[in-house]
Image: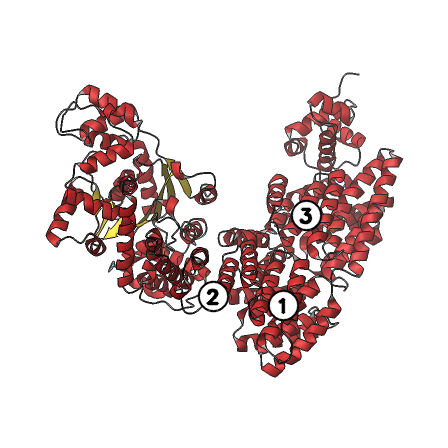
Amino acid sequence: MGQIFDTPFIGRAGELGRLTGVLERAVAGEPRAVLLAGDAGVGKTRTLTEAAGHAARAGMTVLTGHCVDLGDVGLPYLPFTEILGAAAADARLAPAFAGYPAVDQLLGAASGNGAATDPGSRFQLFEGVAGLLAELTALTPLLLVIEDLHWADQSSRDLLRFLLSRGILQRPTPAGPPHRLAVFASYRADDLHRRHPLRPLLAELVRLPAVERLDLRPMADADMARLVRAQRTGPVPDSTVRRIVDRAEGNAFYAEELLAALPGPGSPGEPDSLGGLADVLLIRIEQLTETAQQVLRTAAVAGRKVSHELLRGAVGLPEEQLESALREAVGRQLLVPGDDATYSFRHALTREAVYADLLPGERVRLHRVFARLLAAEGHSPASAAERAHHSRESHDLPDALTASLEAADHAQRVRAPAEELRHLETALELWSVVDAAARPASGDPVTLTLRASAAAVRAGEPHRAVQLTRSALARAGSHADSELAARVRYTLAGNLMRIDNLEAAFTYSSEALALIPAEPPSPTWVWAAATHVMAARYVGRDADAERVARQALDVAERLGLIDAQADLDISLIGLEANNRRTAQGRERLVHDRALAVRAGNVAVEMRALYNLGLGCYESGDLDASLAWLADGLDRARRAGLLTSPYALELRYLQSVLLYTLGRWDECVRAADADAELLPAAGAFTTAPALYVTLARGDLDQAAAGARALLGPSADWMAALVASVVLIDEAALRGDAEECVRRMEAATERLVEGAGSERPDAFVRLAALTLAAVADAAEEARLSGDTDGADRWARTAAGLADLARTTAARGEDGTGQGPEGMAWLARAEAEEVRAVSGPSVEAWERAVTAFGFGEPYELARCRRRFAEALLTADRREEAAEQVRAARAVAEELGAVPLREALDALARRGGFAEAPGARERIAALTARESDVLRLLGRGRTNRQIGEELFISGKTASVHVSNILAKLGATSRTEAVGIAYREGLIERAPS
């Protein structure tokens, strides 16, 4: 930890015990993490130092990383470069680095030794760090300490999230070596305002089973008194101790500083005469010699930590005077020397107080000195961000601009897109205030803004990318050359398509195409045309899209732009009869992928792979689809484009396929893993795991997850998944009214974002809604409610008509594939059930249709098919369908479906009914109360009044009871309950 304390460790025995307990478990092979929270000065560093000492004595290797507060400057992965740098310098650990080149690239870029411009993806870096740490724990038990997490950059937060949620804290395979690791990270709780970026990360991490939070509360008065007395070799008057304890309010650092600020050892000086903490700190500093004060003021401008060489250059003192001043500051425990020839302030509050006390001119002068010294070091990439900070604070804006661009280049090399974006935005702010003669020779604000928008896309901020591209459009004005103006517009169109603003995208792609002529041929016109073709297709202008695509394809062939040829051909395939669903269409897509590979255009290659995977999925070849999707994601991973648009689509489709094929555990595991790497805009990719949550019976969690997807910036795919979950959840609860309302809301939401009046998803949504409507219609008929039955039958007819018209000619003007036709068959079977009761023929068609490879929906249809067979008195066939469906439900863990099948089997008499005790366990306490009142002949309204719930809620409970008892009516349910002793007969 680098700090030595000469006073006893007081008042934190319980907290230290928890930390040492975690260390013991880590040494035994159970990796753990602790988030240590506390106010500034409460004792976090001292507690961690004691824990680190315990770890070292137990044979653990302790590696420490610090986060640094440099205002708006981002130093990507700073605490991890410090940790990994220390590990690489350890002769025992250094050989392990050979197997992880991505980590070497990070260390090389951080030290300025030069990194390759494309060292691999961010995912590879994260996997590399996790793999390296796991390997190191096989050599020695490790304790990683990260201090001041509240100052961490976004990339460091992302890497920590990955390591704790997916990487090194996860248990290894049974055959693998244990991960002997503990991670302690501290942060200031009082610095976390409501919008602090660390807050959501902490909320995620504390939910992990291997992560715990430890709060350092203010110390008790008795412990504070012991601490004060332990600071002095001589006696301290009780009155002084009491006043210090009262003033410090449990803050150990404040108490130490109050005591240190008194005139002398054992002096009865009055702490009440001192001011606040900053005043107390400054009083202590004023007790130093003038030279030592000068050194402290200079070090405070450098930051929490400064190298000896940099400090020597900044203060300009002879070596002997500097050493004397440093010895004085270290002796007074204001500075702490490090093993790497550095000095750190013992506490950040000290540095903050010294810095705040500087005169404005003094502060500017010292920042200018540090900027000059850092520039003289040879423009190290790692120091560029610090130099940009010092140059801005010293008002040297030209150098701040240059350093910000260098820092952006460094962030790009180490795959830190959020920091790259921040530095580019800083550079854009500076560009307008720096004289033209002092700006970089190459570049312009429009091109720089386009680069920032590309960084925003890589950082997973599509809405920010749109804002930046609009800014580029405004900056270009009417003075830009036509090619640049066109590039800005078609880039804006592409970004708008990513946020489903399709009409605006078409407008800007049209403008881009109009700005430059097709002749003479130019690459800019070809790519503007390619973007316009996609935008035109999205808004249903297929004729326009085909005309431009064929013209642009001819120009691309003449220019030899083979990647543009591939991109345009992919668009044309979607406009022709031999589209991606056909073998001929997929053959062309394979050829287009090869062209993109030859051209080195990964984005077009991934578009081809996505269309290959989607085409196989739409044609029912699910195994081939999975293979193409895996190929596409592997390519995205190797290229570092896992958050690019097509990579996100590939992930989503893969998740859907795993769910569809019944590989539910894989679907959930992939979602959990991806959630730690994906930006907020990619949340839809893992959302199909909510289908699993719902089907396994956790209705509340699934509904909550779906509603979380429907935020103000929700994209179309997120809205689709949320709509499926919410409609099916209402259907499973038996609430037909709510189901219809949610269907209407989904229709409005999806039409608005799809650019089509009939998105293909309407077939599935209509079928799910029809399930609840048919249940309501059947219940109305059984209860003699003719008007209600007719109303629900009319609703069913409208929904079925929507499904039929969508299936006939969906959003792209073509018919549905096997999946869509299966949902249509189910929708029509539900319509018949709603109008006249279950139809054997209709449900047999639905079962056959879902045989293409969707086991869960096939099992759900088998359940309804069995009901229809029972109605037709074909009991043996019904039993066969129930057995087949129940085997699937059992394998998938689909509890609601399994319970419904068991109830159907009991009702049909072809399965031994479970005993009363088992069924009582299946009923909730509230359902048991409702069942008791049903036995007394109460209506839903009367049940609600007696139980203080609404009649609607009572109806839901009744529906659940009927399903669990396998009853078709309230009367039958009461009869079963009496027969099995679930309720006692009321006195007549």
Disc number lying in front (3 or 2): 2
Whole-angstrom CA distance, mark 3 to mark 1, is 36 Å
Q: Is residue 882 visible?
A: no
Earlier in the chain: of badge 3 and badge 1, it is 1
In this view, which residue lies farthest toward the bottom?
Answer: 558
Disc number lying in front (2 or 1): 2
Relative vertical location of residue 615 with respect to residue 187 in this rendering, above or below: below
Return the residue nearer the eye: 143 or 636: 636
Q: Amino acid at mark 3?
A: Ser
Earlier in the chain: of badge 2 and badge 1, it is 2
Residue topped by disc 2 = 444
- Which quarter of the image is occupied by the C terminus? top right
Residue topped by disc 1 = 512
Relative vertical location of residue 100 with respect to residue 827 in this rendering, above or below: below
Left or right: where 457 falls relative to 34:
right
The local crowd at label 3, few if under 14, some if 14 to 19, many if 20 or more residues have their Cα within 10 Å, is many
Residue topped by disc 3 = 723
Q: What colour scheme governs how the chains and residues are painted in the rendered image of this protein?
A: secondary structure
Residue shown at 45% from the left, 49% from the top = 165
